[in-house]
Every structure is written in structure tokens, then in C-alpha cells.
Amino acid sequence: MAKVVHAACPLNCWDSCGFKVTIEDGRVTKVEGDDEHPITKGKICGRGRMLEKRINSGERILHPLKKINGEFQQISWEQALDEIAIKLTEYKEQYGTTSVLHSHDYANGGLLINLDQRFFNCYGGVTEVTGSICWGSGIEAQSWDFGDAYSHAPGDLMNSKSIVVWGRNVARTNMHLYEELKKAQKSGAKLYVIDPIYNATAKIADQYISIKPGFDGFLAAGIIKEIVRLELEDREFIHNYSLGFEDLLSTLEKVSLTEISQFTEIPEETITQLARIYAERPVATMFGLGMQRYANGGNTIRLIDALVAVSGNVGIPGGGANFANRQVGQSFQIDTLTLSERKTASRSFTMMKQAEGILTAKDPEIKMAFVTCGNPLTQLPDTNKARTAFSSLETLVVMDQFMTDTAELADYILPVTSAFETEDVYYASMYHHFVNHGPKLVEPRGEAKTDEEIWRGLANRLGFGEDFAYTREEWLNLGLSSLKDYGITIEHLRENKFAELPVDKIPWQNRKFKTPSKKYEFTSGLGKEAGFTGEITLKMPAESTWSNQSLAEKYPYSLLSIHPLRSNHSQHFHVLGTVPEVKVEVSEDIANEKGLENGDIVKVWNNRGNIHGKISILKMAHPKTINIDEGMWRRFGGSVNQLTSDRESDNKLGSTVFDCLVNIEKV
Ligand SMILES: Nc1nc2c(c(=O)[nH]1)N[C@H]1C(S)=C(S)[C@@H](COP(=O)(O)OP(=O)(O)OC[C@H]3O[C@@H](n4cnc5c(=O)[nH]c(N)nc54)[C@H](O)[C@@H]3O)O[C@H]1N2
Ligand SMILES: Nc1nc2c(c(=O)[nH]1)N[C@H]1C(S)=C(S)[C@@H](COP(=O)(O)OP(=O)(O)OC[C@H]3O[C@@H](n4cnc5c(=O)[nH]c(N)nc54)[C@H](O)[C@@H]3O)O[C@H]1N2
Ligand code: SF4
Ligand SMILES: [Mo]
């Protein structure tokens, strides 16, 4: 007998959807949207629906595996956990706990995934990864400007006169915002899209502004200059609630509108027009992650923030510098789960530099790594370096569901549960303010265990088992304890499926910022504390004609590597049902220059690596632009990250994966 029950999407995504899942004979057979979810309203994407394929896939790893003489062999959980615990003890005694690296990303948005930190803290503190390939530059930039990175609630777009989608591929990555954009347009809002690619969101825009990759900071600077020249700035906000505006003005004097037009490849008239649009409040700016994955990414976001502030669009209904929703994650009692006070040693590498860190760390060297919720061999920049680094480890433990590029290198693979095989609550700090309940719907397949059970098994062997002697319900209550006064408990969530978190729907409305001065900081105190000048600088991307001419002569084209339509990063290609292949999308001028037609096989390369793929010509893309979607396993043609750089962004906490020059030829 089939039954339909509620669940939640665990994937790392803007939307954090509510699900309806069909179960037949103890098996998940269908995943659909829950029409009662207030934000996601019954609509979900293919990645969500394909979670049924992921859970039932014949390729699922169902037993612990150990590599013996180059071949994986099935072993028992007892043996796997005993041997790993012995290694952890030996490395701790011989070299100290920071000889172990915890490499992870955020593939599962469940609250209890945070227990990984509890385990490593109780062990004594390992080498951790900081910053983020995803949104690190922007989070740091907004923390300097506002004190944190907070967005308006989705429905607030109905108050906007104009909406600027800046470097966000909404139709592909954030489908419920796409619906909201269309609704807002119907009620009179104008939509502007700024992107080097004429994507599906650009197609519905009232105006599409095509920009040279990496030059958005200059565009924002140009718009501010024009706002000031036309005397359209919000003097009241600048005077009463901000700090450092004069510094910003003197920075802007260093560049003329004509130069800005040259760099951005956007006509001066368009920049002036955007100044008038920004001054006609309210304007909602919907930041994507695109323009911050460059060497100048932090300054780029700071300049766009500055534009939002100067034009008076901070803290007003229908406005906002909408980049991230950190208030969501901050609503939970994460500290109680992670026990950070328990670690006695610490060391960190940035996520971008973890391969470099493995290869060069001394006192102690990295001997062992745990990979959880991530596939670094596909997703890290400069994957050739990552391969060398992860191959050089004495012991690599990968906790995953599938034989990813990273799992292939492991000494031990520990099979983890998939969505619907355990209870958790799910939240994404990206788009909306709801937390969703995900019940356990079916038994784990094979011998798969939750990450939490694995930590408990190891903790028991390492002598701190009492720190893990909690049931799932007890853990969830601990993590939700900060929300108890608002009536949000696990019992409430089980019954009601989701709950709206008690966070500001219009952040900074009271104009009290979380910066050291409590003002909006054009010149940042936190930036100074972090060892920078704190001032906004006009920086170019690292790899462009303007910043590195000799490199641009060898490698004339900008390579983007945006998120795939049908897969969440590397997670769905193997369950699509068709064999995926690498698609090389090129702007029309490149096709003309190189005589390329759709379907041609090409090689794309630079000094870091090369990749082969099939040409697809991109209509109306910015000249000299190429895109290869990220996320492809080796077995399907390989990751575009063979070409990207592991350089950190200007504020050190973000990646520069889109800041990448390449050449291309037909093979
Ligand atoms: N289908 C799908 N959806 C996803 C994901 C997925 O893997 N697949 N991943 C999820 C995750 S983890 C994240 S972080 C989000 C990311 O969500 P987005 O930020 O929407 O996605 P990205 O693919 O990073 O694309 C960024 C956009 O920026 C543009 N861009 C690139 N360089 C520049 C530039 O210099 N200037 C400007 N103005 N634009 C630029 C690209 O052309 C692209 O349209 O998506 C989430 N949703
Ligand atoms: N060139 C380029 N590179 C990029 C990006 C880009 O735009 N361009 N985008 C970056 C961004 S935004 C992000 S967020 C990262 C994503 O990078 P990753 O998170 O490393 O990418 P995924 O492919 O989602 O891999 C996640 C892995 O975690 C596993 N997993 C899923 N659930 C669980 C669980 O509950 N427990 C455990 N232990 N494992 C689980 C999955 O099976 C999968 O193999 O990639 C970054 N890399
Ligand atoms: S991947 Fe994103 S849009 Fe798709 S179902 Fe999950 S949360 Fe919703
Ligand atoms: Mo991401």
C-alpha cells in the first residue's frame, strides 16, 4: 500500500523545499513538492525529484570498504571503526591532533550534520577548513559593511519598484525566486539582469546588461559616481547612519566613467540610466554568487553594497542588499551541538588552499584526512593539485553514498545514509526564513549509517563516548533549544512540517548595524582588525587583459564554470538516465573566430590543465566568454576545476574559480 508523507529537501540550494514523498513496501518511490509549504508551494526541481533515484540507485555504496593492494574490499563496521580509531589514536600520540584534516563542504543542510565538529573538537581539535568556495568573499564583505549578511523575506519583492538580479542564475538555481520575479513584474516592478551570460532569467528581464566577467565592482563604482554627480544620493542615510563615505568618494575619483565603460564593456549611457533607476527607490538587489568568485570578489560585493547604501535602499521595504540569510543558521543553538570549548589544538587552511595545505604543512604534517559532505576532487579549484595532495595522504577516510572522484582515492569508504533514511531538520541560509522537518521515512539501505552514528562509533572507541550518548530526538531538542520560546520544538515541527524562524523580514530597518561603529561602514573596522586598510579598493580580476596582458595573450578567453541545471554540483549526473558529457559553451564571437559549430569537439586549456568537450554556441553571451558547467566526475569527462585556480579572493575567504583565462581549439 502506498502512503504519502511530508519530508524536506536536504540539498545545498537556495530554495530549501518542502516535499511530499510516496512510500511503497518500505521503499521511496516518488518525490514531489508539498503544496502546503508557504514558500515553495508544491513546486520542486528535478534535483529534488531525483533524490528517489539517488536513494534507490544500484551504485549506492552499502558496506564499509577498505582499499587493500589497490582494490576496495568489503569489511565489517567493527573492523572499519576499530582500525580508523587506532589510526586516530596513533596520529594524536605521534604528531598531535592537527595532523588530521577535516575536509568538508555543505552537501546536507541538516542541523545534526554539525555534529562532525563536536567529534573533532572532543578528539582535541583537528586542522579545519575556513572560508568558502561558494560564497566566502561575499559573506566577509557584507560582514565588513553591515556587520552580517542578511536578506529580506521573499514576499518583500512585491514592494519593489525595480529588482536588479546581479550575477544570480535564478531560473536555474533558485526556481521559487524566479516565480516571485514574474509575480513582481506583473504587479509593476521592472526587472534588470546583470550577467555575462544571457540566461533564462535575462530572457524575462525588462533589460539585460551584459558585463565583462569580473568587472562588476567597476560598474557599481560607475553607478555611484553618476548618482553623486546627479545629486541623487540619500544624504540622510549617509550622514546619520554611515561611516567613511568621504573615503569612498576619493577612491571613486581614481577612475573616470569612460574608463569604467571601457573595463566593463557597458555603454556610459547605461551606467547613467542605472544610476537613475537606483535612485528611484525601492530597489531590491538580488546578489548571486557569480561576481564574487574572482580575485577582487570582496571589493566587488563591497562596491555593490555601497551602491545599495548610497542610493538609500538599505533597511527599507522592497530594498536590500540580498546576498545571504545568515540569520537563519544563527537561529539554532549550534554551539551546544559542537562543543567548541573542548578543542585544545587548532589549525586551519582556507577551503581553497586545502590541497596546498596538505602538500606543505609542517609541524605537524597532515597524515590523515576525513572527507564528509563534499567531493573535493571534483569541486575544489585546481583539481590536479587536489589529486596530488589527497593521494599523498597516509590515510584518507571518505564518508559518502557513491564512488565519487574523491571516494576512489580513499583508504576507507564509510557508507552514509541518504535523504529520507534519518530524521533531521533542514534549513538553507540562502533564500527564505523557514526551517523544514524531514522525518525518517525508510530504513537505511544496506549497512549505511548516519554521519552521527559513525561519530558515535568512533567516539566510543576513543574514550569520549559519553559526549555522543544522545538520541536523535535529544540532539534535535538541543539544537532547537534557542527556539523553544517561539514554540519551535521538534514536536511542533513533526506536527506542522515547517516553521517560520523569528528573524527580521526587513533587516537593518532600525539602522542599527552590527559593525564596530554600529553604522554602515564604507570604511570597515572589521576589515582593519583583519589586517587590511578597511577601505574599499577598485580592484581588477587577476586574470584579464587589463590586469595581466601577457597571460591574456596566451589565454584570451574568460572561463566561467557555473552550476549545472540538472545536477546539484556533482551529485546527480550519474542518476540522470543518460550518459552526461562535457559541454563547452562559447560566445558567438569565439565560434566565428575559431570556426566552431555546435557539436564540434574542442580542447580548452591553460597552464593548470585541460579538458575536452562538445561545443554549444551561447546566444548573446558577453564576447570572449566560455562556460563549462561544474560538477562532472572523471568518468564523465572530468571536472572543469582542472583549469581553475586555488588563489584566494582579496579578503582571503573566497574562491576565484571564475577568474580564469583559457584558450580553445578544435580537435
Ligand atoms: N541547478 C542547480 N541549482 C543550484 C545548485 C546547483 O548545483 N545546480 N547549487 C546551489 C548552490 S550550492 C549555490 S551556491 C547556488 C548558486 O547560485 P547562483 O549564484 O545563481 O549560481 P552560479 O552558477 O554560481 O551562477 C552565478 C551567475 O553569475 C554569473 N556570473 C559569472 N561571473 C559573473 C560576473 O563576473 N559578473 C556577473 N554579474 N555575473 C557573473 C553566471 O553567468 C551565472 O549566471 O545555487 C544553488 N542552486
Ligand atoms: N568551478 C567551480 N567549482 C565550484 C563551484 C563553481 O561554481 N564552479 N561552486 C562551488 C560551490 S557554490 C559549492 S557549494 C561547492 C560544492 O561542493 P561539494 O559539496 O563538494 O559538491 P557535491 O557535488 O554536492 O558533493 C557533495 C558530496 O557529499 C555527499 N553527501 C550528501 N549527503 C551527505 C551526508 O549526509 N553525509 C555525507 N558524509 N556525505 C553526503 C554527496 O554524495 C556528494 O558526493 O562546489 C564549489 N565548486
Ligand atoms: S534542489 Fe533546491 S529547488 Fe530542487 S527540490 Fe531541493 S531545495 Fe527545491
Ligand atoms: Mo554553493
Image: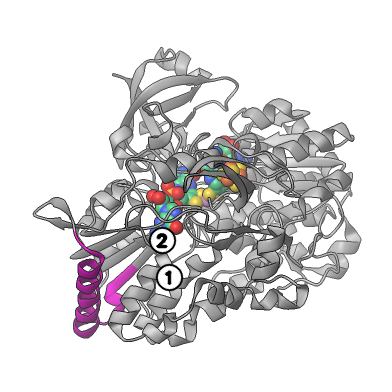
Query: What secondary structure prevails in the magenta region?
Result: helix
**Residue 44 point in image, percent of width and height:** 63, 40
**Residue plotted at (38% across, 41% down):** 57
Residue 551 occupies which quadrant of the picture?
Answer: top left
Q: Is residue 363 left or right of residue 104?
A: left
Q: Nearer the viewer, residue 258 or 498?
A: 498
Q: Which residue position is annotated with label 1? A: 116
In what quadrant of the picture does the N terminus appear?
top right
Q: Confirm if mark 2 falls within 8 A of ligand 2.
A: yes
Name the amino acid type tagged 1. Answer: Asp
Disc sitting over residue 104 in the figure: 2
Residue 252 in sight here: no
Disc sitting over residue 208 in the figure: none
Considering every residue shown, the one lying at the far left of the view is 69
**Residue 592 point in image, percent of width and height:** 47, 13
Proximity of marks 1 and 2: CB atoms separated by less than 8 Å: yes
Q: Earlier in the sequence, mark 1 or mark 2?
A: 2
Q: Between label 1 and label 2, give the one nearer the viewer.
A: 1
Task: Using the numbered discs, state the Cα–Cα distance from disc 1 to disc 2 in whole angstroms.
Answer: 10 Å
Name the amino acid type tagged 2. Answer: His
**Residue 453 point in image, percent of width and height:** 39, 69
**Residue plotted at (89% across, 44% down):** 280
